[in-house]
């Protein structure tokens, strides 16, 4: 048990948020417990001979809920990986999939390793052996358990895993669907790399579509000109910042990274910063910005929107009272602890929760999984037909009305949707409709006064109905 006033662990935070939402749902205690607990957790220890020595690695794969199969969830490579963390992340995946109506159960995995300690060829051998160990237990399988990238992993690792699974299962025609987040040439899908960051953008756009909701965060107007601080410029933070500044006109006034943080009230050029980081390894010495050695302090800088996009627990009971952002959107998993959540809500800070805000990744992973099972690229069958039909319509309009439409309009209107356009369209629709479902609960006169509890409510109701349909 957590001592009074002490910081809750990530798993305790998830459980507490579950309990808070479940209190509004009439269901038997046994069903409630079944939804909450992790179905199974596997600890895997395996050896790989490297550099003349046998090295033993410890990995985990947690399966939270199988009310829908396959189960879905990333694999992270980090020395901080432990059983409690993967159980909490697996539970969050279950709720996340349910709230955005993606037909997966929740799972999560990890390997206790620092990828930077190993050469690429060594990391490949470790990953392939880990895949073998998972495969023996059906913890990687197109119809049972489908991993994806997470912290410390990416397209490269997913390609290795998919290839190793194919070697182990030579007659499995759907072997590419055993993981998502693969490179395009290995069965991936356009838009997967950007998906979580793009989902953050679409989540904010959905929120800002309602003036009443914007006022709840003590803000007004649109995303244009809003001052944003991003914590973590990895894949998620980079794409969120890039799209919000480049397409919505927001100002990225602060970026927090491992070596410190930078501030510029006039806005930071994200592409230039990313290039600087690729060359130097950090944000220090980026021209035209003020460097702050202790990056954690920048979480407390004045801004309109704060985007924590890295690790869990960065906003906690120690710094929550000092947060000046009006709106926090959780691009990472669990960046705000349960303790901090209560403090922030009392202060009037509005939070768009992680189980919704960073669901873009699993949504597009679902699209990739469907693509792999169908063995055909999205848009392949209809794109040219759409273009021919649209060109015919333009020609008919110009002839009938006796006008000449602009080249820009004709080009934009006649172009058929390719895979990237279809993925983005599907993701936007998912984020918008999911926000509306949460909002409906939040705005209903039943006592739920925050979006996080509303999100958990939507998810738990959906999962409960799934179990009831199974006869449980």
Image (cartoon, rainbow, N blue to C red):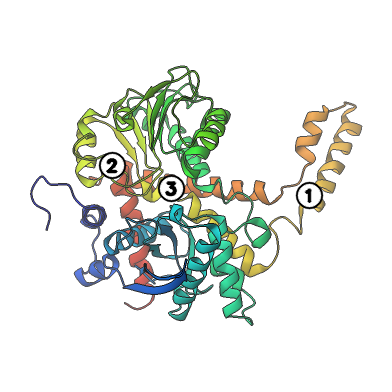
Image point 35% across, 32% down: which residue? Answer: 327
Image point 46% across, 81% down: which residue? Answer: 136
Asked whether residue 125 is in view, the answer is yes
What residue would you read off at disc 3? 358
> Residue 347 in the image: x percent, y percent?
21, 30
Q: Nearer the viewer, mark 2 or mark 3?
A: 3
Image point 64% across, 51% down: which residue? Answer: 190
Precedes in sequence: disc 2 or disc 1:
1
Precedes in sequence: disc 2 or disc 3:
3
What residue would you read off at disc 2? 450
Q: Viewed as shown, does residue 449 lie left or right of 379?
A: left
Q: Viewed as shown, does residue 12 lie left or right of 94?
A: left
Element class at badge 1: helix
Asked whether residue 243 is in view, the answer is no
Q: 258 and 333: which one is in front?
A: 258
Element class at badge 2: loop
> Residue 11 in the image: x percent, y percent?
25, 57
What residue would you read off at disc 1? 386
């Amino acid at each position: 048990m957590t001592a009074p006033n002490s910081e809750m662990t990530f798993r305790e935070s998830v459980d507490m948020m579950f309990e808070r939402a479940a209190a509004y749902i009439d269901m038997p205690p046994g069903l409630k417990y079944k939804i909450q607990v992790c179905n199974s957790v596997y600890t895997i220890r395996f050896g790989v001979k490297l550099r003349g020595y046998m090295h033993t690695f410890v990995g985990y794969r947690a399966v939270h809920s199988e009310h829908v199969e396959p189960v879905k969830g990333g694999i992270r490579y980090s020395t901080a990986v432990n059983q409690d963390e993967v159980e909490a992340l697996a539970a969050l995946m279950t709720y996340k999939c349910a709230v955005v109506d993606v037909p997966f159960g929740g799972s999560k995995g990890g390997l206790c390793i620092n990828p930077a300690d190993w050469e690429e060829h060594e990391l490949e051998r470790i990953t392939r052996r880990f895949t073998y160990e998972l495969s023996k237990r059906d913890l990687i399988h197109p119809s049972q358990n489908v991993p994806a990238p997470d912290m410390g992993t990416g397209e490269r690792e997913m390609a290795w895993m998919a290839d190793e699974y194919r070697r182990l299962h030579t007659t499995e025609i759907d072997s590419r669907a055993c993981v998502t987040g693969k490179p395009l040439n290995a069965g991936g899908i356009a838009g997967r790399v950007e998906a979580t960051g793009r989902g953050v953008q679409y989540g904010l756009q959905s929120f800002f579509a309602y003036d009443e909701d914007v006022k709840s965060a003590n803000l007004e107007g649109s995303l244009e000109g809003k001052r944003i601080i991003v914590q973590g410029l990895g894949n998620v933070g980079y794409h969120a910042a890039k799209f919000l500044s480049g397409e919505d006109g927001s100002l990225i006034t602060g970026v927090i990274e491992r070596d410190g943080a930078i501030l510029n009230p006039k806005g930071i050029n994200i592409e230039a910063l990313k290039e600087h980081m690729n060359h130097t390894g950090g944000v220090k010495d980026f021209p035209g910005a003020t460097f702050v050695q202790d990056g954690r302090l920048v979480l407390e800088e004045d801004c309109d929107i704060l985007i924590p996009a890295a690790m869990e627990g960065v906003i906690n009971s120690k710094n929550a009272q000092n947060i000046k952002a009006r709106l926090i959107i959780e691009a990472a998993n669990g960046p705000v602890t349960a303790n901090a959540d209560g403090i922030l809500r009392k202060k009037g800070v509005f939070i768009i929760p992680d189980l919704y805000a960073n669901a873009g990744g699993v949504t597009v992973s679902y699209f990739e999984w469907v693509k792999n099972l169908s063995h055909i690229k999205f848009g392949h069958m209809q794109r040219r037909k759409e273009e021919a039909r649209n060109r015919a319509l333009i020609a008919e309009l110009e002839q009938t009305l006796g006008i000449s439409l602009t080249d820009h309009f004709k080009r934009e209107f006649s172009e058929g949707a390719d895979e990237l356009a279809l993925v983005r369209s599907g993701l936007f629709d998912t984020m918008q409709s999911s926000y509306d479902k949460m909002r409906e609960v939040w705005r209903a006169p039943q006592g739920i006064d925050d979006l996080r509890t509303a999100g958990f409510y939507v998810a738990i109701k959906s999962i409960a109905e799934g179990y009831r349909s199974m006869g449980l």
